[in-house]
Amino acid sequence: MHSIPVNIICGALGSGKTTAIANLLANKPADEAWVVILNEFTDAGLDALTLASAARGHFDVRMIPGGCLCCTGEEDFRQQLSSLLTQQALPARILIEPSGIGHPGSIIEELRLFERSGAIKLCSVIALIEPKRMEGLCELPFIVRDQIDAADVVLLSKSELANEATKIQFEQWVNNLFPAKRFVGLSERGMLSSVALSPPNADVSFSFLRAEQRHPHVHEITVKSRNGSLNGVAITSRAHRYLDRDACGWVLPVGMMFDLKKLQQDIASHQLFGKVERFKAALRTGIDRWHLLQRWGNQFESREITWRNDSRVEVQMQENATANWDKWDEWIASIMER
């Protein structure tokens, strides 16, 4: 079965989402039928008219009014997707534009349900952020931070209006975000890089592990399942040493869930953390719940996030501290829900 590629393009009001999609429609192959699911706050349909005037060849714009696709428009969104995937002529690509006040996490969860059947492939979640936002990064609205958390691609939109200092600030800021973004770039006059639309390759990057030489290793961990049998779980990790510090990152399957209470207790008191300089984790802690957990020195943070791509753990040891990554593998297995 051919999986239809899907992209979510999100951002605050005025960030350039509609302009970006209009450019994509204007430059797509004329013989390909693309569909845009557009979430507008009202039913006036002005953005739909903008997209229609720009489109090249076959296209369809389906509008869902309401402030958030998976709040006020949840049932409509599900019906629109189901209709698209059961029609005789399937679209070549689906683009989804949530409203500027829409939360992307629930949309991703809904798409994952369709993805499990093989009908679609969620290729990327793209967050657009305007240059003017760089002036108040410490005061980003919750919804903007939500969108950036959920994205695996972050672009500085309207970059033709940004000076070099702003572009450098943007790149440094995004490259320090966790989970690490797959692609960081600039969008000038609504143009999007093809990389931003493409699915990720197998080489997943880590925010600590960006050096040229990285050493992948895979461990088979045996864990006890709920029915009492043993279940082998493959965990891919990369170990790295930089500035006399050992670091390692793990990428874990999206289906794994972790015990939040045990996580919080262990991060505060487990002996493994005695010589840890920095710990970061983005983990699935429920059916539709994900948490970001961080520890640096004696400080600890735990908050819900909208990341939905996979679970990740990163550990950076103190200077000249020796790390036993096998022990960390065992600890990751111990916090998995049975």
Image: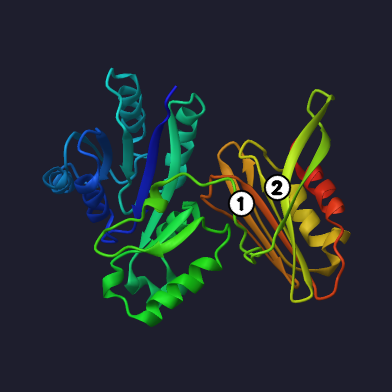
**How many labels, in total?**
2
Residue 176 lies left or right of residue 256; in this view the side is left
Residue 215 lies left or right of residue 290; in this view the side is right
- The three-letter code of the residue at mark 2 reads Leu
The C terminus is located in which quarter? top right
Residue 206 lies left or right of residue 57; in this view the side is right
Q: Which mark is residue 279?
A: none
Q: Residue placed at 55% from the left, 64% from the top?
A: 177
| Tags 2 and 1 touching, CB below 8 Å | yes
In depth, the one of 81 and 251 nearer the eye is 251
In depth, the one of 201 and 54 nearer the eye is 201
| Mark 2 / mark 1, whichever is N-terminal | 2
Is 304 located above or below residue 319 in the figure?
Answer: above
- The three-letter code of the residue at mark 1 reads His
Q: Quadrant of residue 93?
A: top left
Counting from the top left corner in percent of width and height, residue 90 is at 30, 25
The residue labelled by disc 2 is 260
The residue labelled by disc 1 is 291
Is 282 located above or below residue 287 in the figure?
Answer: below
The N terminus is located in which quarter? top left
Counting from the top left corner in percent of width and height, residue 197 is at 39, 48
Q: Bin the neighbour count of mark 2 within 10 Å (Cα to Cα): few under 14, some 14-19, many 20 and up.
A: many
Is 336 located above or below residue 78 in the figure?
Answer: below
Q: CA distance from mark 2 to mark 1?
A: 8 Å
Q: Residue placed at 84% from the left, 25% from the top?
A: 228
